[in-house]
Amino acid sequence: MKILILGGDGYLGWPTAMHLSKAGHDVLVVDNYLRRELCRETSGEPLFDVPNLADRAILWKETSGVSIQVAIGDLNDWSFVSEVFGSFQPNALIHYAEQPAAPYSMLNRRAAALTLHNNLGVTFNVIYGVREFCPECHIVKLGTMGEYGTPNIDIEEGWLEIEHKGRKDRFLFPRQAGSLYHTTKVMDTDMLWFYVRMWGLRVTDLMQGPVYGLETEETGGDVRLYSFLNYDEIFGTVVNRFSVQAVAGYPLTVYGRGGQTRGYLNIKDTLNCIRLAVENPANLGELRVFNQFTETFSVLELAEKVQKVGNALGLNVQVDSIPNPRKEMEEHYYNPVHTGLIDLGLQPNFLTDDVVAGILETVIQFKDRIDKRKFVKHITWK
């Protein structure tokens, strides 16, 4: 298939491009380097330098013999969207092209406005790009499990059957986002569902949990092909951040009691989930929702796991409870369903001690580049 990857420079975008191109698909990646710019602005640069997209594509071609096309531009610019969609005519697109960090969206008014306008504006342009240039194109949008919040009932896979006063209907599962970033993802879903009903679009919405790791089948241990390893409070996902803190000798920063429970997945599983969704598309006029994670952990459980493995490597890892900057429940019920992708053939990669050790060993190679000032930036939700 011809697959368009929007946000193809990101933590997940570039590994997805390598994975799908290696599987034989014709891949075009699009990005405007917004994530890199915001990381520089907030002093949240990744642990090691990552080549630009043009250089990444050249390196991937030299390493694998497989080509990836690159286009640089802003997907909030309709003229650029028209040019890309009109010339490439994708069969499927993967929509990563959003400001991805909850803490950034809560930083100040400017950051909140950027998050709102970028995320919703890009989704709106994507919908119109598909409508005008490739109406049968399958939109695969990366949502987040954070859209659901932590309700005191089981979280179904996107939809909920309701019986009320003797009548029955089916609705999108209620959402109660915990940040402005997560709220924009809820609004993405609502907008896509509206245009699925109006125009018969073909959409898969992936409610993804936090991702960890760097190593994929395509990198083969070649650090030059790795994605970003952010470890700051804004852009660093929790397992990656804890791993860098452990190597740096910095106490793992558990928010409050650490009972916040979420669904997590290995970066390898993100790639496999995306490929399964793309190669088994939704029907025209269908909004299909998958909950994309493999295991659930509390934050404290993750810290204790990193501590255990780190200590076995001789790191002397400490765990520290710090005041929670977020407005969230620290102890709650959490039981989300996640069968759809398993039914399509997903074979999960679990967070074993060996996987944690692999992340720590990668970080150790760059220990001298760790800046401890990046770990805590005191961004509060209140």
Image (spheres, grey):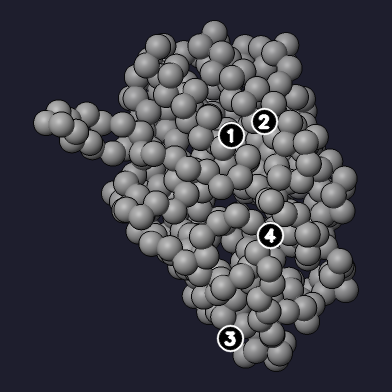
Say which of marks 3 and 1 sits in front.
1
What residue is drawn where x is 44% and y is 17%? 195
Marks 3 & 1, CB-CB < 8 Å contact: no
What residue is drawn where x is 84% and y is 70%? 372
Distance (Cα) linking label 4 and label 1: 20 Å
The residue that mark 1 highlights is 184
Q: Earlier in the sequence, mark 3 or mark 1?
A: 1
Mark 3: which amino acid?
Lys
Marks 4 & 1, CB-CB < 8 Å contact: no
The residue that mark 2 highlights is 116
Q: Is residue 268 left or right of residue 332?
A: right
Distance (Cα) linking label 3 and label 2: 40 Å
The residue that mark 3 highlights is 308
Number of other residues with Cα within 10 Å of mark 2, as a class: few under 14, some 14 to 19, many 20 or more: many
The residue that mark 4 highlights is 325
Q: Earlier in the sequence, mark 3 or mark 2?
A: 2
